[in-house]
Amino acid sequence: MLVFAAYTSITQEQIAAYISYMSRERGITEGGMADFQKSLEGFLLNRPDGENFAWAARQAYIALGTGIIAAAELKIDATPMEGFDAARVDELLGLKEKGLTSVVLLSLGYRDEEKDFLVNLKKIRIPKEEFASIID
């Protein structure tokens, strides 16, 4: 089970830690990233926490999509889940103390092919023509 979480608020300290990490990984001095840091601070620190949390939660969904694709590539079954008791998950994992809130879960594993009556049925997907509008 993977738990995707988002920060409930974004702080100057978090941004500074991100810049420090990025500079180490890229071999760039932190001073060389000063403009980028100021840009992040100006954008994120001047918005309400709720707006930043909504943004961070959408970032978690991008990671969820990557996780689903990676699982499919490895032939691992994956099921994304919402509707869980986020407060309870947060409590069990100590996320609140880390400034995080769980957003979405991804269970991973292998189906029981002997007991799964759906395993051999054709996958049903909405036809591309109904699902998407193609603009020429």
Image (cartoon, grey):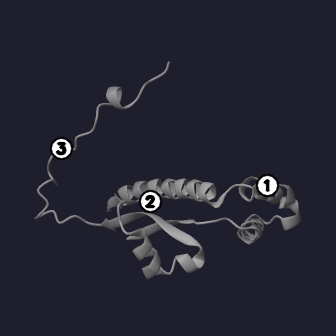
Q: Which mark is residue 122?
A: 3
Q: Residue 30's x, y, as percent? A: 84, 66
Q: Secondary structure at mark 1?
A: helix
Alpha-carbon distance for marks 2 and 3? 24 Å
Q: Relative to residue 84, is residue 22 drawn left or right?
A: right
Q: Secondary structure at mark 2?
A: helix
Q: Earlier in the sequence, mark 2 or mark 3?
A: 2
Residue 33 picture quarter: bottom right
* Residue situated in front as seen by the camera: 31 or 44: 44
* Residue situated in front as seen by the camera: 16 or 11: 11
The amino acid on which the numbered mark 1 sits, given as a three-letter code, is Gly
The reply to whether residue 121 is visible in this rendering is yes
Could you tell me which residue is drawn at 40 percent across and 64 percent down?
A: 105
Q: Relative to residue 15, is residue 1 drawn left or right?
A: left
Q: Which mark is residue 81?
A: none
The residue at which mark 1 appears reads as 42
Q: Residue 28's x, y, as percent? A: 82, 64
Q: Which mark is residue 67?
A: 2
